[in-house]
Amino acid sequence: MKVGSTKNNLATLKALYITYAFLLILRLLVVIGFSLLFWTLFDTPEFQSELIESGDFDSAMLDAPIKIIIEAIFAVIFVVGLVHCILNVVAVNYIDKKKGQTFIFIVGILNLFSGILGIGLGVFTIIEITRPHVKEVFEKA
């Protein structure tokens, strides 16, 4: 993993991307869980009758498209998270094969928008991928 006498951190970067992809999968499972919880809770007659009896909720709202809108929001969050996870897994493959430096750089930038762990991984990716000796490794492969 050395070019000349300079060491790179591509193995560490690969391990971090694998770990982050696993955490993204866990986040997707949480989104699915909340979606199922919302759907089952909102559709139970006991819950609906409690809402109506509380006076804060009109029975006409049970037929409103609010359930569909909320489920659409869950679906969009799930799809965006799934694409994010797939991009990170593909980046792992590119890091392993030492090709696609631009793609890895773009995924690192996208990770900057995904929370505190993504910021750390994105900054590390940008720093590591833009080093001259790492560019040489990608050009030789």
Image: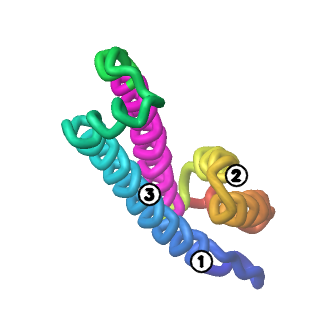
Q: Position of residue 42 (x, y in %)?
A: 30, 37
Q: Are dots 1 and 2 in contact, CB under 8 Å?
A: no
Q: Position of residue 140 (x, y in %)?
A: 61, 60
Q: Are dots 2 and 3 in contact, CB under 8 Å?
A: no
Q: Secondary structure at mark 3?
A: helix
Q: Main secondary structure of the magenta part?
A: helix
Residue closer to the observer: 1 or 115: 115
Residue closer to the observer: 77 or 5: 77
Q: Residue type at mark 3? A: Arg
Residue closer to the observer: 65 or 105: 65
* Among numbered discs 2 and 3, the one appearing first in the sequence: 3
Residue 67 visible in the snapshot:
yes
> On residue 112, which mark appears?
2
Q: Is residue 111 left or right of residue 76?
A: right
Task: Identify the residue at the far bottom of this view.
Answer: 5
* Among numbered discs 3 and 1, the one appearing first in the sequence: 1
Residue 129 visible in the snapshot:
no
Binning the other alpha carbons within 10 Å of mark 1 as few (below 14), some (14 to 19) or many (20 upward) gives: few
Q: Residue at x 40, y 41 (%)?
A: 78
138 vs 79: above or below = below
> On residue 12, which mark appears?
1
Give the alpha-carbon distance from disc 3 to disc 1, as whole Å: 23 Å
Q: Position of residue 74 (x, y in %)?
A: 41, 37
Which quarter of the rendered picture does the N terminus lie within? bottom right
Q: Residue type at mark 2? A: Leu
Q: Nearer the viewer, mark 2 or mark 3?
A: 3
